[in-house]
């Protein structure tokens, strides 16, 4: 189980996260739902180790991993598709997906992963990861790389952004795949119809957890409040 315990984050100007508590249990799909600027990416970066919380802890199976780097966490099985994927100019999609040869996987697996994200192998395997790929194609390739990695925890920061109308269907296929291989998904989104596809949701606004529960309930709440930040409804934890 991956947890945030009383996590606060402040930059020079202000507090961005206020005592956030979240738990991600094995094999369940989660969403973190909230409007732009709510603090979702900040939470993802803290889970991944890219940012250190100002106070509070990140726990993995009850061990404090707050001090571990991104690389150390990746070795423990925590991986992420960033909201703004990194660029790895000059290598082919295929080499990118097998981490330059570090992953021992065959062509059929690569083909399957690419097809799961809607990219035909023949058209993409030999393409270069560079500016010639659209934002949506890049996002799909990042998703395929996580599919091949089969991490214990897959953090997806707005995987639907930059994708077209078929995003919902794609997200469903990816969630289904991760559920089958026992990966815990933490899907970050500001679209409630995407959050509705996960089992359990956390709704955050202005750096505070406002509601948590089965996604159906949280999405209902979100619709009733029109996603507005009703600080009276704060979750005590
Ligand atoms: P979300 O992902 O939910 O859209 P973020 O976690 O990216 O929200 O941002 C939360 C808040 O922190 C926002 O108000 C944003 O403007 C602020 N913020 C994020 N990154 C920085 C930064 N590098 N410098 C200053 N403010 C930042
Ligand atoms: Mg955002
Ligand atoms: Mg964000």
Image (cartoon, helix red, strand yellow):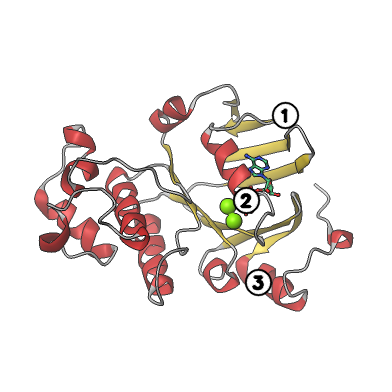
Q: Earlier in the sequence, mark 1 or mark 3?
A: 1
Marker disc for residue 219? 3
- Report helix, strand or loop for mark 3: helix
Q: Earlier in the sequence, mark 2 or mark 3?
A: 2
Instruction: Using the image, determine if residue 144 lies above or below residue 58.
Output: below
Q: Quadrant of residue 163?
A: bottom left
Distance between mark 1 and mark 3 Cα atoms: 30 Å
**Crowdedness of circle 3 by 10 Å Cα count: few (<14), some, many (20+)?**
many
- Report helix, strand or loop for mark 2: helix
Residue 49 lies, in percent from the top left, at: 54, 31
Distance between mark 2 and mark 1 Cα atoms: 16 Å
Q: Are marks 1 and 3 in contact (CB under 8 Å)?
A: no
**Crowdedness of circle 2 by 10 Å Cα count: few (<14), some, many (20+)?**
many
Residue at screen point 13% across, 62% down: 123
Residue 149 lies, in percent from the top left, at: 30, 43
> Residue lying furthest front in this view?
131
Distance between mark 2 and mark 3 Cα atoms: 16 Å
């Amino acid at each position: 189980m991956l947890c945030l315990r009383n996590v606060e984050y402040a930059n020079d100007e202000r507090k961005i996260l206020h005592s956030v508590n979240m738990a991600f249990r094995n094999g369940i799909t989660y969403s973190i739902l909230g409007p732009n600027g709510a603090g979702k990416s900040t939470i993802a970066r803290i889970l991944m180790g890219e940012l250190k919380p100002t106070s509070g802890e990140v726990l993995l199976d009850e061990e404090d991993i707050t001090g571990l780097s991104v690389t150390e966490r990746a070795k423990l099985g925590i991986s992420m598709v960033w909201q703004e994927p990194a660029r790895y100019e000059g290598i082919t999609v295929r080499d990118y997906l097998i981490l330059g040869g570090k992953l021992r996987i065959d062509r059929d697996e690569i083909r399957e992963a690419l097809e799961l994200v809607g990219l035909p192998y023949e058209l993409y395997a030999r393409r270069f990861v560079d500016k010639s790929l659209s934002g949506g194609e890049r996002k799909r390739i990042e998703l395929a790389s996580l599919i091949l990695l089969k991490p214990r925890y897959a953090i997806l920061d707005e995987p639907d952004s930059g994708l077209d109308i078929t995003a919902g269907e794609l997200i469903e296929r990816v969630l289904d795949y991760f559920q089958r291989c026992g990966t815990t998904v933490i899907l970050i989104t500001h679209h409630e119809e995407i959050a509705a596809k996960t089992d359990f949701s956390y709704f955050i606004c202005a750096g505070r957890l406002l509601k948590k529960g089965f996604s159906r309930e949280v999405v209902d709440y979100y619709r009733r409040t029109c996603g507005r930040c009703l600080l009276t409804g704060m979750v005590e934890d």
